[in-house]
Image (tube, rainbow, N blue to C red):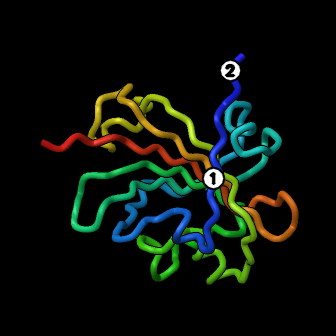
Amino acid sequence: AHSPTIYAQSVTSMEQLLNYPETWRKTLTSRRVRADAALAPLLKCKPGEQWFLLSTLRHPKGSTTPMCWIDIYLEPRYAGVTRHKNQDHMLICDQIVDMYGETLDRVHMELSAGEVPSRMARRLKVTPGSPALFVLRRYLDITPFFDVVSDREVLVKRVSH
């Protein structure tokens, strides 16, 4: 069996890690959801646990063509981030720090290659099954392994001529 290659990077801020200058988010939906058997392993929770889902598209500044789809799963107590004054431009983790006083300590990231799911393709303006990079992040506070927020990002490759 082939062992996966593991990459490590040291950074000093969330902005360096995520590096999203000059972008904005468009909220598609925000609602409470219960983790089913498929979602629970992704969120590392028990089936039936309640989460607040915020689905968004991230766009480069000045563009209406999205660069990625982001499903953000928050503990329901953080649902108020949808009312933050900089909700469309500020990192969700920074909004939680700003609004709720949480101290985020770590981010666990997993990257994998895949195909754009059919349910996302039209909004991303790509063909279903197009190549995509999946980024799963878990933001943790100073209490070991306490999820503040998890998100799953689907980045699509754009070809310019």
Which element is circle 2 on? loop
Query: Tag 1: residue type?
Result: Arg
Q: Is residue 23 above or below residue 55?
A: below
Q: Secondary structure at mark 1?
A: strand
**Residue 2 drawn above or below residue 31:** above
Residue 18, percent across and down? 52, 62
Find residue 97 and report its image quarter. Answer: bottom right
Q: In the drawing, does residue 8 fall left or right of residue 62?
A: right
The answer to whether any part of residue 88 appears in the image is yes
The label number, if any, that marks residue 145 in the structure image: none
Q: Residue at x 22, y 67 (%)?
A: 62
**Number of dots carrying numbers:** 2
Q: Which residue is mark 2?
A: 2
Looking at marks 1 and 2 on the same chain, the residue that comes earlier in the sequence is marked by 2
- The residue that appears at 72% across and 83% down in the rendered structure is 101
Residue 137 badge:
1
Evaluate if marks 1 and 2 touch, with contact meaning CB atoms under 8 Å apart.
Answer: no
Residue 32 appears anywhere in the view: no
Q: Quadrant of residue 58?
A: bottom left
